[in-house]
Image: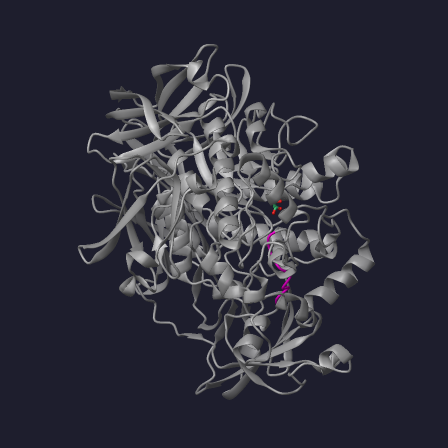
Amino acid sequence: MNSNTEKIILSDWNFSLADNRASSNEIKKQKIKPGKWYSAQVPGTIHTDLLNNKLIDNPFYSDNELKLDWISRCDWIYNTEFILKEKRNYNLVINGIDTIADVYLNDKLILSCKNMFLSYKIDIEKFLRQGRNELKIYFHSPVNYSIKEENRHGKLPVALNSYRVYIRKAQYSFGWDWGPSFPTSGIWKNIILEEKREAEIENVLFTTKCIGLNYAVVKISASIKTKKTNSYKLFIRLQNSEVVIEKKVNITKSGNIAAEFEVANPNLWWPNGEGNQDLYNLSISIVDKENKIIDAVEKKAGIRTVELIQKEKNENTFKLRINGKDIFAKGVDWIPADSFLPRITNEKYLKLLTLAKDANMNMVRVWGGGIYENELFYNLCDELGLLVWQDFMFACGSYPEHEDFIQNVKEEVNQNVAKLQHHPSIAVWCGNNENEWIWFQEQKSSYKKMPGYKIYNKVIPDIIKSIDSTLCYWQSSPFGKETDPNSFNSGNTHQWEIWSRWIDYENVKHDQSLFVTEFGFQGPANKDTFEKYLPEENMNINDKVFEFHNKQVEGPERINRFLSGHLPLNTNWEDYLYLTQLNQGFALKTCLEHWRTNGRTNGSLIWQLNDCWPVTSWAIVDSELQPKLAYHFVKNIFARQIVFFSKRENYIEINLQNQNRKEFNGSLRINVIDVSTGESDKEINKEIVVKAKSKIIVDIISSEFFNGSKNFIVFASLLNNNGSLVNTNYYKEKPWKYFKSAEAKISLQISVKDSNKQVSVKTNKPAYFVDLYSPGIVFNNRGFTILPGEEIIINISGENVGKIKTNDIKIFSLNKYL
Ligand code: BMA
């Protein structure tokens, strides 16, 4: 559908350094001189434009970040020209400006911006000229602006950098405990010249009101802007491959038009693992009397209901109910996928979110220190079945409450909720990240006294209610009904005793959370990723530059402390990367298994899926999009069916949990292995049937194996009826570092199947947590345990896959260190 109005994306941008700080010595040292123009990329940032023009070094390399501080303290100017053959009636559509900027058209100020999360549509008719026109944007330093605001209104209790809360800009850009400080400036989304229409569709909302036995009632509404009365009709159509539902409504004036539809036998939208992700095409158009389309909007909509259940049988709980069915949320927290946002490609979004789905996840939390993500992100979540927990963009601090600021926030909330509301994936809207909790801990007083409290308690929920009263809103993460917002007794929690407060992950067994939206454990980026960004002399675990790529205070120290609790210490570069990545895997596996099997917790989200630069962090996928070892542990423990063990007085129980909505049929193999000899002292093979959404005890093993200084572990492999491996797990009673292990001779063979390369892995003795490494090669399975007689096939890809030979592959396994 095209309404034939002209749209021109403005291109050919240039940038230049404004000369208000040009006399500063620091700026004088730079290659760039004020007044000189360079070509710019839009969407883009000043940092990436300076990089593209070779005016700065790669910000991610080594400790270059330290040399680039001046950029965010300068003002910058962007401009472009466009020629109009005839003077038409245009709007200027600005999809996103980062952040404090004045926009001039032919030297007339047409807009001042101070919120990167807003978009604008400005009538520019009176400023346009036939022929040459100039659009110029003056960016004020985001740092100077925020400091000035902080001086004016007062310093607030804020974690990390305090002035950041005074600017409506992605908070992580000022530096975080996993991210560098690059407060960008720039045109971060497109700017478009758009011919004005006589009538326009401003927002489209889609709500599932209820789902019955064989029908659903949905409400579709659109807000219309028109100067003419009674000239147009609104044409609404909802369609999939089976049905078309249509309605025409007269447009009498500007305002909201809503229509309800009954959809017979609807195809519902389900989260990953619970059913299909059926979507309907929703099209809304304004047509005139001759049926000419004046404006049109197309979206994908999903029919589903969401409930956030907080009480059950008089007990507090916290769980998601989708289409009337309880869901155990398995997922991750999401941070912006680059320090330089406009650089994030569609492929990157697809790859990261597909990795989440492939790891058996069904939920992603968009964390409040980043951004409201772009349309593609939510479209992908809709398609992949990833529920979204959507924070508003406030994190780890108190926030101002002066009138200007609140007005700015109101506009931001209005725009972003209206824009994203129709996505079936978005399940929970959440006021902020950790603000109430941090206040409570640091100020030792009620969070109701916290500056900014009314934003999450009143401003946001009022707007949400006015847009769609069915949306689930939660005030903060973590939050609950208790005085301590992070209580186990109600609401959701962040588990940071483990890791951040130096508590070991085995202590997770005391965690009584109802729903965990954050917990995590650090591990280094993959070897290839680090080696791309570190000078060779810094590839050393005690090196300052290597440690610079860990942004948490005492991050490197924690890695070592927890490593020493579980695994042998080894300071060689490659061994250290393997062992510390392995420990991250153990930590996440231990925690996720506890929450999944304790019968009380209804969701666990890992801090964090991704990174914004090459760093040692909590991420399970590094900044080059390579999964770390921990990713594979997560995928295994998030499988729909898992084996797990419970210690009883004289025996160990072997349990099987089926989280699927279908019955599971398969087989289980249990080996009781003496690690010191590599021999199996006992083997159990069982055919298994477990009903949908249930748990059974499969067998027991005597505790005798674990008495004294014995070296036994139990290893379990669960296969489905096709013989494919579904899940593996192990049981042991002492840390790995106390085991002695028999050496394993692992053999590899490379072959080609359907033009894809594979490596077959075999062993003569059990080999624990095998990891293969070769530069420029991606192995699709890492950290697996293999027993004699088994063969494990790994698919390989990556830039060097064409020339790889078996001898190029280095084999890591825990055996070598025990
Ligand atoms: C929580 C998050 C982030 C932080 C992470 C790790 O506080 O909300 O702010 O990066 O833990 O410390």
| Residue at 25% from the left image edge and 25% from the top image edge | 667
Does residue 580 show up magenta in the picture?
no
Residue at 69 percent across and 51 percent down: it is 406
Look at the picture and state if 298 lies above or below 321: below
Residue reaching furthest to the top: 650
Give how far across and how far down residue 334 sits, in percent: 50, 48
Q: Position of residue 574 (x, y in %)?
A: 49, 53
Query: Looking at the image, which residue sits at the far left?
Result: 754
Magenta extent:
178-184
Between 379 and 252, the one nearer to me in the picture: 379
Indicate left or right for 278 with 257 as reference: left
Residue shown at 54% from the left, 15% from the top: 314
Left or right of residue 68, residue 2 in this image: left
Query: Which secondary structure dominates the residues rendered in magenta?
Result: loop
Q: Is residue 182 above or below residue 726?
A: below
Q: Residue furthest bottom?
A: 131
- Kindly tell me whether residue 169 is visible in this rendering: no
**Residue closer to the observer: 483 or 32:** 32
**In the image shown, does 330 or 295 lie closer to the viewer?**
330
Count of picture labels? 0
- Please name the colour scheme applied to the rendered image: one colour
Q: Quadrant of residue 79?
A: bottom right
Residue 249 seen by the camera? yes
Picture layout, residue 649 above or below residue 541: above
* Foreground of the two, 299 or 272: 272
Image quadrant occupied by the N terminus: bottom left
What x and y, as percent, mark residue 248?
A: 32, 50
Residue 297 coordinates in the image, percent (x, y): 38, 58
The quadrant where ligand 1 appears is top right
Magenta stretch containing residue 179, yes or no?
Answer: yes
